[in-house]
Amino acid sequence: MFVGHFALGFAAKRVAPRTSLAVLFAAAQLADLLWPLLLAVGLEQVRIDPGNTAFTPLDFVRYPYSHSLALLVVWAIVFALVVRSSALVVSLLVVSHWVLDWITHRPDMPLYPGGTRYGLGLWNSVPATMAIELAMFAAGVWIYATSTRAKDGVGRWAFAAFVAFLLVAYAGNIFGGPPPSVTAIWIVSLVAGVMLVMWSWWLDRHRLAT
């Protein structure tokens, strides 16, 4: 999943209107924000393997600390204690990452470090993955757009540009070639993750909950 995680962050604004969109996105994407850091220091491992699934050229060899269900429950508690805003909502968003990845990934999602790994393998079909994920994204964007209103031009156009950027990045992930190296993966993932959280914070400050 990619835009599917953002879809839940957008939609959560309706039930947590006083919580920044950046916090909601960081919660939904926390596993993927931690992953490049753990990849960089060698605690987790990925391999570039074109054909691993129809959707992605990556083989997620080992990511027990960022993507196991048990550790995501722990991260959810820690994150909720840190942000102290809509604790239940942000905790559920953190754990939702495992659920969505379990649906899309082949069986590589661990229940706990060293435990049995699961996955339904939606990524084996590009059309099915795109249909489900884009429908989720459209619903999430619509919920956010109808739960907030722009205070000014920034709130209107920064939001539109953010949505467009996510869609372009999504298309690039699908139709672009494999990444050149594992180092490039963690650098781009880390920079993009931080940039998107900051961008969402900025655009959300220029919108009001309705």
Image (tube, rainbow, N blue to C red):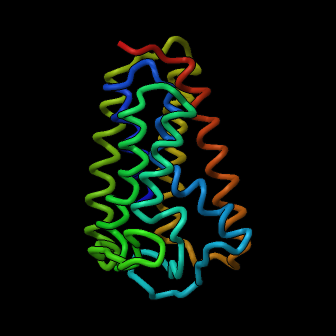
The x and y percentages for residue 104 are: 33, 68
**Residue at left offset 25%, top offset 68%:** 128
In the image, residue 192 above or below residue 130: above
Whether residue 58 is visible to the viewer of this picture, yes or no, is no
Total marks placed: 0
**Residue at left offset 59%, top offset 83%:** 47
In the image, residue 51 above or below residue 150: below
**Would you identify the image quadrant in which residue 8 lies?**
top left
**Would you identify the image quadrant in which residue 32 lies?**
bottom right
The x and y percentages for residue 173 are: 51, 66
For the C terminus, give its image quadrant: top left
Residue 50 or residue 71, whichever sits in front: 71
For the N terminus, give its image quadrant: bottom left
In the image, residue 143 above or below residue 63: above
**Residue at left offset 33%, top offset 59%:** 100
Whether residue 187 is visible to the viewer of this picture, yes or no, is yes
**Residue at left offset 72%, top offset 63%:** 187
In the image, residue 52 above or below residue 188: below
The x and y percentages for residue 162 are: 53, 39
**Would you identify the image quadrant in which residue 93 lies?**
top left
Left or right: residue 176 versus residue 146 is right
